[in-house]
Image (tube, rainbow, N blue to C red):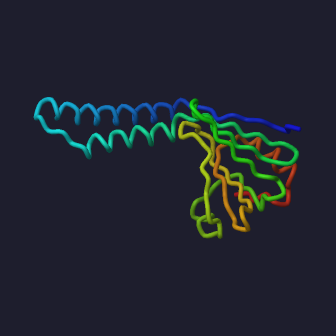
Amino acid sequence: MIAYTEESIITLERKYYAIAGLVAITLYFGYEISRYFTQNYFSTMGIGYSILFYILWGWKCLPKYTYTLTDTEMIFITDYKFFVLKKVVKLEDIESFSNNYIKKFFKKTKISRYYYRYNFTDGRPERLIAFKRNNKLAGIIFKCSDKMIKKLQEKMPERFIKF
């Protein structure tokens, strides 16, 4: 049974940053193309970097995330329009979760792998769920509302780390 579902949101300030980044990448790409036509100089590296920056921008700004909390698991769905990725974490495998991801603190832990499940344009704070994966500790960094954390806290109050 689904206890709570939440989707990523786009805040206006972050949307402006994303658009500014896209404009900067496009200007750089246009500069490299104009160099080819005006100076007859083709920069493979410049065009390659432009394409790489477009891919990175799309990877961080375009996907839509859905977080679903059920009675037995937490489901993270990443929708890229062309394909969908799904990550499922059983509640019994969760070691701890936090209402705030503090990089300095969590980098000192024994978390071996981090999964990033949030959109750059989402202005909410980063949260962390630490869970067991193949007898190693892994973590999912995601952005959600306080209501989602409260629902998680109701299910597992002893595993909650407050910052």
The answer to whether 109 appears left or right of 42 in the picture is right
Which residue is rendered at x = 28% and y = 36% of the image?
A: 28
Examine the rendered structure and indicate whether residue 92 appears above or below residue 107. Answer: above
The answer to whether 59 appears left or right of 122 in the picture is left
Which residue is rendered at x = 21% and y = 42% of the image?
A: 43
Residue extending farthest left: 39
Which residue is rendered at x = 43% and y = 40% of the image?
A: 55
Front residue of 38/20: it is 38
Percent across and percent down for residue 139 are 66, 58
Q: Quadrant of residue 56?
A: top left
Examine the rendered structure and indicate whether residue 79 appears above or below residue 142. Answer: above
Front residue of 63/101: it is 63
Q: Quadrant of residue 150?
A: top right
Which residue is rendered at x = 63% and y = 36% of the image?
A: 84
Q: Quadrant of residue 35?
A: top left
The quadrant the N terminus occupies is: top right
Percent across and percent down for residue 130 are 71, 59
Front residue of 50/8: it is 50
